[in-house]
Image (tube, rainbow, N blue to C red):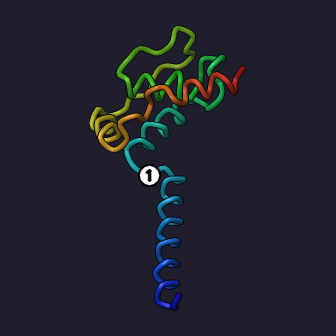
Amino acid sequence: MNAKFYGVMGAMMLASVGALANAEKGEGPCRQVVQACESAGFVAKTAKQGTGLWVDCVNPIMQGSAQPKNAAKALPAVDAGVVSACKAKRPNFGMGKHERHEQKKSS
């Protein structure tokens, strides 16, 4: 293998690391939904207390549904355009995957 190949591979790896860093920061409309919930006092792994980040806030916002009956806080106002943009970017976001994970961890 030559130096040019390794240079290209190195650049690809750096680009991948950059993309992962952006995902970690959670930039974009879906992150705005999560931030609105966090600002309203919802916290990951607290579904049993009615303040679960996903179960009590993100999922109801993204699904356009009511909160669970045990929700202890009101949903924050999130612009419908932000929700639509999030759905366009990540169609499965807030559709229940985290709900099952959060309930298991809070047990």
- Which quadrant would residue 100 be assigned to in this image? top right
Q: Secondary structure at mark 1?
A: loop
Q: Please state the horizontal and vertical placement of residue 29, each as a whole percent of the image.
A: 37, 44
- Please give left or right for residue 1 compared with residue 84 in the image: right
Q: Residue at x 63, y 22 (%)?
A: 103
Farthest residue to the top: give it.
69
Q: Nearer the viewer, residue 25 or 41?
A: 25
Farthest residue to the right: give it.
107
Q: Please state the horizontal and vertical placement of residue 30, each as a whole percent of the image.
A: 41, 41
Farthest residue to the front: give it.
1
Say above or below: 75 vs 8. Answer: above
Q: Please state the horizontal and vertical placement of residue 89, each as a whole percent of the image.
A: 33, 44
Q: Which residue does the numbered mark 1 point to in the structure image?
A: 27
Q: Please state the horizontal and vertical placement of residue 38, each as a whole percent of the image.
A: 54, 35
Q: Residue at x 51, y 29 (%)?
A: 97
Q: Which amino acid, mark 1?
A: Glu
- Please give left or right for residue 29 compared with residue 47 in the image: left
Say above or below: 99 vs 82. Answer: above
Q: Residue at x 48, y 58 (%)?
A: 22
Q: Nearer the viewer, residue 72 or 105?
A: 105
Say above or below: 47 vs 33. Answer: above
Q: Nearer the viewer, residue 86 or 92?
A: 92
Badge 1 density bin: few <14, some 14–19, many ≥20, Cα 10 Å = few
Say above or below: 7 vs 36. Answer: below
